[in-house]
């Protein structure tokens, strides 16, 4: 359905420089669009075969969307590694995340276009401190800014400075398997409420709800993930291969919430949205925006509430108010049919020899009850953790060890991928040099992702130097080949 590569119209030098010489995906997209536009405008010539196929494909999608009912094929389960733990008997349990992939191209396009369409209309009706999967907007004195998790750290840093010497109390709540347990009826109700606030007409709302319901009908965690993984021995093959466990020496499983298993079977089949689906990201924002209203509907300069997807953190200058709001928030989760990890006291993770500091159990706690951010005994801790960062009350920042480990693994993967490309005799020296430059740019973008807020103390830290050294080491290893 696309024009042959040799017929592409190459974008002008001005366009290539505007997109960035290394951004091959944007340049390829532009080349395709210009080529299709050129071939459509040619009059008196026979329509190319690819254009006939493309038009037929587009018309099939339009006809499907005109039908009163829409159905989507169920996605394919594609587990990915999440964590590994060892049992007392010495065996290992590998927990996987149930990623789902829609294989039919028509379905993919319907889902992706609906997601983009929805985001445009509902974004301004979400509260400002939802940072994930948003359109570009004015945020923190920036125009046309697309927020990411670095902005969460900036908000915390600003709040810390604004409060000066005032005490700051912190609490967070972790939702159990949000994507796997969310009730379908709650999704529909939340979307109906937010669509009523938009300027969409009735036809637009009906079309959106038709696609949304088809999306929900195509998947539930119990049938499409849990039972599929239990009955199909080949589901975990890719994970076993990555872990070099071809002979299945380990136990593989999907994470699950016991509360769901206690529900009647028909109710289990009305829970869960596919992880990896474009609409699932919009669903997370819309439903959790509803949950958050019990906190954000009232302005409070002494409070900071931040959400990134299903991760949240709350800060307040009053212990009692922070504790009250956290209880209200937990009740709101329950009312929306969601489950959360029980709150634990930070005092229970204090070192016996030095009660001013916590042990490693602090980082294993899923939901922290209200504690003081700073040194002290009881419910207090000098560090808070959010989105892979750990920050002290004085502003000192560090990355979690898991993030450093993931970066090491990424460097190793890049080395072998680069090596294979550089040894490919079919590639020219120019292509090899361009590919190497692009790879290093992506690698440095990964480092800069963690330093986007330009915090000098972190950039001079041991962790940041370690990441830079890994990048330099990769280049040196390649130079020796």
Image (cartoon, helix red, strand yellow):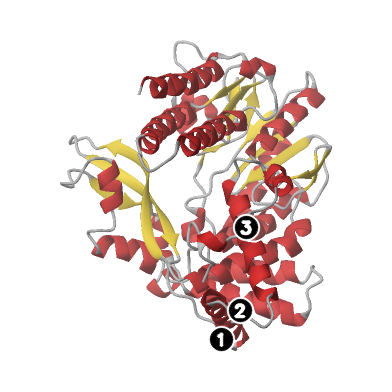
Q: Which residue is mark 1?
A: 69
Secondary structure beneath label 3: helix
Task: Determine crowd level at label 2: few under 14, some 14-19, many 20+ residues with C-alpha closer than 10 A.
Answer: some
Q: 38 or 182, which lies in front?
A: 38
Q: 85 or 342, which lies in front?
A: 85
Q: Which residue is mark 3?
A: 31
| Residue 186 percent across, percent down from the top left | 59, 67
Q: Mark on residue 120?
A: none
Q: Which residue is mark 2?
A: 210
From what the image shows, is residue 397 above or below residue 70? above
Q: Residue furthest bottom?
A: 68
| Residue 166 percent across, percent down from the top left | 78, 22
Q: Residue furthest front?
A: 44
Q: Is residue 96 left or right of residue 132?
A: left
Task: Determine crowd level at label 1: few under 14, some 14-19, many 20+ residues with C-alpha closer than 10 A.
Answer: few
Secondary structure beneath label 2: helix
Disc on the earlier residue, 3 or 1: 3
Q: Quadrant of the C terminus?
A: top left
Give the Cα separation between the discs numbered 3 and 1: 36 Å
Q: Is residue 249 left or right of residue 146?
A: left
> Which residue is rendered at x = 41% and y = 41% of the image?
427
Secondary structure beneath label 1: loop
Give the Cα separation between the discs numbered 2 and 3: 34 Å
């Amino acid at each position: 359905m696309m024009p042959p590569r040799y017929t592409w119209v190459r974008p002008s030098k001005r366009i290539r420089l505007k997109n960035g010489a290394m951004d091959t995906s944007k340049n390829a997209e532009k080349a395709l669009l210009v080529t299709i536009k050129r071939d459509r405008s040619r009059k008196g010539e026979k329509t190319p075969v690819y254009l006939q196929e493309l038009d037929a494909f587009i018309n099939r999608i339009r006809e499907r969307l005109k039908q009163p009912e829409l159905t989507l094929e169920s996605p394919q389960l594609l587990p990915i590694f999440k964590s590994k733990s060892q049992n007392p008997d010495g065996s290992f349990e590998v927990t996987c995340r149930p990623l789902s992939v829609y294989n039919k191209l028509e379905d993919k396009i319907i889902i992706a276009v609906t997601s983009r369409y929805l985001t445009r209309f509902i974004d301004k009706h979400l509260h400002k401190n939802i940072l994930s999967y948003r359109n570009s907007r004015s945020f923190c004195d920036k125009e046309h800014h697309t927020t990411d998790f670095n902005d969460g750290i900036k908000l915390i840093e600003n709040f810390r400075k604004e409060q000066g010497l005032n005490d700051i109390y912190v609490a967070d709540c972790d939702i159990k398997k949000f994507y796997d347990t969310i009730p379908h009826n709650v999704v529909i109700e939340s979307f109906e409420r937010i669509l009523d606030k938009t300027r969409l007409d009735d036809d637009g709302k009906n079309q959106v709800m038709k696609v949304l319901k088809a999306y929900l009908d195509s998947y539930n965690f119990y049938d499409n993930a849990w039972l599929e993984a239990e009955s199909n021995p080949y589901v975990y093959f890719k994970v076993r291969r990555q872990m070099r466990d071809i002979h299945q020496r380990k136990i593989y499983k999907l994470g699950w919430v016991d509360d769901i298993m206690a529900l009647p079977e028909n109710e289990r089949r009305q829970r869960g949205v596919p992880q990896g689906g474009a609409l699932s990201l919009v669903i997370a924002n819309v439903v959790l925006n509803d949950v958050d209203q019990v906190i954000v509907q009232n302005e409070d300069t002494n409070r900071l509430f931040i959400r990134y997807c299903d991760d949240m953190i709350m800060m307040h200058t009053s212990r009692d108010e922070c504790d009250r709001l956290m209880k209200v928030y937990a009740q709101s989760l329950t009312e929306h049919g969601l489950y959360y990890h029980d709150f634990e006291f930070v005092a229970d993770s204090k070192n016996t020899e030095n009660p001013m500091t916590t042990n490693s159990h602090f980082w294993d706690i899923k939901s922290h009850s209200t504690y003081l951010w700073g040194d002290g005994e009881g419910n207090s801790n000098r560090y808070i953790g959010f989105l892979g960062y750990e920050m002290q009350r004085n502003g000192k920042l560090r990355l979690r060890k898991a993030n450093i480990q993931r970066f090491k693994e990424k460097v190793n993967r890049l080395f072998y991928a680069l090596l294979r490309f550089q040894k490919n005799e079919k590639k020219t020296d120019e292509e090899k040099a361009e590919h190497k430059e692009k790879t290093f740019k992506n690698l440095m973008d990964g480092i800069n992702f963690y330093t986007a807020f330009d915090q000098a103390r972190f950039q001079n830290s041991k962790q940041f130097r370690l990441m830079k050294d890994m990048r330099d080491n990769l280049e040196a290893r390649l130079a020796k080949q």
